[in-house]
Image (cartoon, helix red, strand yellow):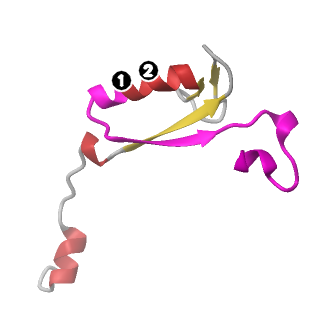
Amino acid sequence: MRRDPFSRRLARETDLAADDLIQPLFVIEGRGRREAVASMPGIERLSIDLILDEAARLDAIGIPAIALFPVPDPSTKSDDGCEAWN
């Protein structure tokens, strides 16, 4: 199985470090707000002021990137996704 370069690449060990990670963060409107995400234990939706603190904490432990996922208020949702473009 390891005679071809392709097979060797598939079978080799993989190194994973904090520098390889991207942390998803779920953003809600307001200040000082933190909401648990029931379907994802240990994950919370955070207001922007808390996102800044969390981003600093992630940077301090070596995670180089975050992906922001806004969570709009359900009352602002529409069929055309207008709030998503806001």
Dot 2 corresponds to which residue? 53
The answer to whether marks 1 and 2 mark residues whose Cβ atoms lie closer than 8 Å is yes
Give the farthest residue toward the bottom: 4
* Placement of 52 over or under 65, stated as above or below: above
Q: Which residue is at 71% across, 50% downward?
A: 85
Left or right of 14? Residue 63 is right
In-front residue for pair 29/58: 29
Q: Residues within 10 Å of mark 2 (few under 14, many from 20)?
A: few
Location of residue 47 in the rendering, given as x and y in whole percent from the top left corner:
60, 23
Marker disc for residue 32: none
Give the farthest residue toward the top: 32
Q: Quadrant of residue 59?
A: top left
Magenta part of the chain: 58-86
* Helix, strand or loop under label 2: helix
Give the farthest residue toward the front: 86
Image quarter where the C terminus lies is top right
Dot 1 corresponds to which residue? 57
